[in-house]
Amino acid sequence: MTTRLSALGTVPVVSAIGVAVVGAAGRMGSTVCEAVEAADDLELVARVDAEDDVAGLAAVGASVGVDFTVPAAVEDNVHALLDAGLHAVVGTTGWTEESLGRVRDHVERLNAERSDGLGVVIAPNFALSAVLAMRFAAQAARYFESAEVVELHHPNKVDAPSGTALATARHIAGARRDAGRGDVPDATETQIDGARGAVVDGVHVHAVRLRGLVAHEEILLGNPGEQLTIRTDSFDRVSFMPGVLLAVREVARRPGLTVGLDQMLDL
Ligand SMILES: NC(=O)C1=CN([C@@H]2O[C@H](COP(=O)(O)OP(=O)(O)OC[C@H]3O[C@@H](n4cnc5c(N)ncnc54)[C@H](O)[C@@H]3O)[C@@H](O)[C@H]2O)C=CC1
Ligand SMILES: O=C(O)C1=N[C@H](C(=O)O)C[C@H](O)C1
């Protein structure tokens, strides 16, 4: 923080957080650039895309790197952002327990030698409706015999199932395990591979790709004679922006690795 003199005396001037967007030419990256430019307390200092180097980002005033790229590139990008001395906010999908573990180790190793710790926030979904849907699904899962997840996205999405659906299924599976629930009932013998979707920790996950969609998910929970449907719809990528900006503003206050926007909300 710097200070300046004014007619009222010395007042603190909070300098804007310098943000570099990695994947800036993409659907999400370009939306993040617009959101950062519209925020008074943030400054967009770099737009980075494939083939650009992140090593010099601190020198141009970046303290936070935001990554919306591709699953094949994201882990390397995060390690490179950390090596460049930046906090990282990451929405790109494709994470495994192993790749998360490598990032956790890396940031903790760097922080052991720094007075101000670096933070990494990785969230499969920054939209409030999706974060709440995941939370409600985990809360409800223990009470239902059956649970399935259907994710529906635009046909340009490169990965399936979505990172959100994977996280949702894992939360549901964890809640079922904690409640001592066994396998979901399913007597079906499939005639064609894939007919029952992918199975994630025992939970069936189905992926729809349809022109006109953005990002949607339905969680179906069934009992004899009743069904609970939890649905989240992102009709526009602006839905992700409040969550992304919250993480950009908070990441420096959270040294180490944070997984999930729910960790940053008072839910
Ligand atoms: N966490 C969340 O809330 C959300 C996550 N996503 C995820 O974000 C990712 C990006 O999605 P979209 O923007 O729709 O994809 P996109 O394909 O429109 O954009 C990806 C961008 O990354 C660039 N890129 C590729 N490799 C790169 C590299 N090594 N370094 C820098 N840039 C590179 C591409 O040139 C492109 O401009 C996906 O994994 C998607 O699932 C998408 C929406 C919301
Ligand atoms: O690719 C997308 O569009 C989205 N990706 C994320 C995911 O895979 O969960 C988040 C959201 O569903 C949009």
Image (spheres, helix red, strand yellow):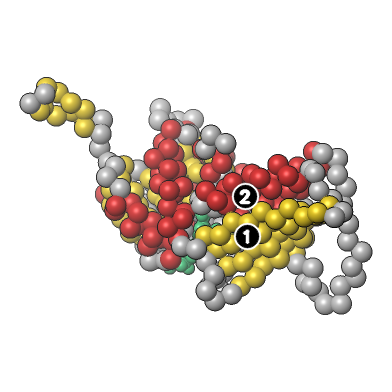
Instruction: Identify the residue at the far front of this view.
Output: 225
> Depth check: 98 or 234 in front?
234
- Extreme-left residue of the structure: 7
Q: Residue at x 50, y 44 (%)?
A: 121
Measure the alpha-carbon separation of dots 2 and 1. Answer: 9 Å
Left or right of residue 17, residue 151 in this image:
right
Which of the image's four quarters has the N terminus?
top left
Q: Amino acid at mark 2?
A: Ala
Picture coordinates of residue 85, whole percent (x, y): 39, 42
**Which residue lies at the image location 21% right of the left edge and 32% below the top edge?**
13
The numbered dot on residue 163 is none
Disc with the residue nearer the chain's start (2 vs 1): 2
In percent of width and height, residue 125 lies at: 54, 52
- Residue at 40% x, 27% y is 115
Q: Nearer the viewer, residue 152 or 13?
A: 152
Question: Pointer 2: residues within 10 angstroms few (<14), some, or many (20+)?
Answer: many
The answer, for residue 189, to whether it is visible in the render is yes
Q: Is residue 7 above or below residue 22?
A: above
Location of mark 2 (residue): 133
Q: Residues within 10 Å of mark 1 (few under 14, many from 20)?
A: many
Q: Confirm if mark 2 falls within 8 A of ligand 2.
A: no
Residue 34 on image: x %, y %: 33, 58
Q: Secondary structure at mark 1?
A: strand
Counting from the top left corner in percent of width and height, residue 196 is at 79, 68
- Mark 1 sits on what residue? 217
Q: Is mark 1 within 8 Å of ligand 2?
A: yes
Pointer 2 and pointer 1: residues touching (CB < 8 Å)?
yes
Q: Is residue 239 above or below residue 192?
A: above
Is 47 placed left or right of 73 in the picture? left
- Residue 67 in view (yes/no): no
Query: Horizontally, is 171 left or right of 79 in the view?
Result: right
Q: Amino acid at mark 1?
A: Glu
